[in-house]
Amino acid sequence: MKDIVSAVMDSIHMAGLVEIEVSAKHVHLTQSDCEVLFGKGATLTPKRDLSQPFQFLSDQRVTLIGPKGSMSHVAVLGPVRSATQVELSKSDCVALGVNAPLRESGDVEGSGAITIQGPAGSLDIKQGVIIAHNHIHVTEKDSKLLNLKDKDRVAVEVLSDRPVIFEDVIIRVSQNFSCKMHIDFDEANAAFVHGFTMGRIIRKIDRKGIGRSENW
């Protein structure tokens, strides 16, 4: 049975198909910032696992405070990281009055500022707020099947009632990944993404932004 499931998944990925997941606003914390917000010695408590291995939604929640407003009960994801990061949609940024760039996760140098409030304290971070660039997590095995490399760019057609095509989607390859495409709520609403939705990789994008065909 396991071999049959593996063969089916290989066929799906060989066709350039990938499941699309919607990522809501959330926060990643360093251990020291976690303790500022939740108390000395605090650790993130897993509530449920996420689709990517070793990642989890924690029980902890925070409030985000910007120049124009605040948002409460914002999810904190674990495990802790080397840099604190807040991921928002453009609509979230407008509501909060925060100026955040479109970036890959982890690229926070010179990004947006915000206040994070927890039950034990608050943080005024000078950088760390980003709008996450849409991307596809790809396993090393599937990257070889699809002839894709880490940091490649592709165009993806959303197979929904409103079949939007997302250009310049970043490929992220790791043996620790599960094959999923991640978009934010603004993108999901524009493309009518809800429930189980698939996307289809339709072409690679070269560094000059010119599409080139592939046989998916």
Image (spheres, grey):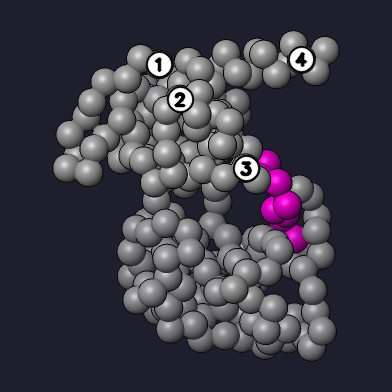
Q: Which residue is mark 3?
A: 175
Q: Residue at x 54, y 21 (%)?
A: 13
Q: Could you say which disc has been placed on residue 216 in the image? A: 1
Q: Main secondary structure of the magenta part?
A: loop
Quarter of the image with the C terminus in it: top left
Q: Could you say which disc has been placed on residue 146 in the image? A: 2
Q: Is residue 174 above or below residue 165?
A: below
Q: Which residue is mark 4?
A: 3
Q: Nearer the viewer, mark 3 or mark 1?
A: 3
Cβ atoms under marks 1 and 2 closer than 8 Å: yes
Q: Nearer the viewer, residue 97 or 17?
A: 17
Q: Amino acid at mark 3?
A: Gln
**Real-space Cα distance between discs 2 and 4?**
20 Å
Give the magenta range.
Answer: 50-58
Q: Is residue 51 above or below residue 123?
A: above
Q: Nearer the viewer, residue 121 or 139?
A: 139
Q: Position of residue 173 (x, y in %)?
A: 51, 43
Q: Is residue 151 above or below residue 25?
A: above
Q: Circle 4 — which element? A: helix
**Real-space Cα distance between discs 4 and 1?**
23 Å
**Real-space Cα distance between discs 3 and 4?**
19 Å
Cβ atoms under marks 4 and 1 closer than 8 Å: no
**Real-space Cα distance between discs 3 and 2?**
15 Å
Q: Amino acid at mark 1?
A: Trp
**Can you see residue 183?**
no
Q: Position of residue 151 (x, y in %)?
A: 39, 46
Q: Earlier in the sequence, mark 4 or mark 1?
A: 4
Q: Earlier in the sequence, mark 3 or mark 2?
A: 2
Q: Position of residue 4 (x, y in %)?
A: 74, 11
Q: Amino acid at mark 4?
A: Asp
Q: Circle 3 — which element? A: loop
Q: Nearer the viewer, mark 1 or mark 2?
A: 2
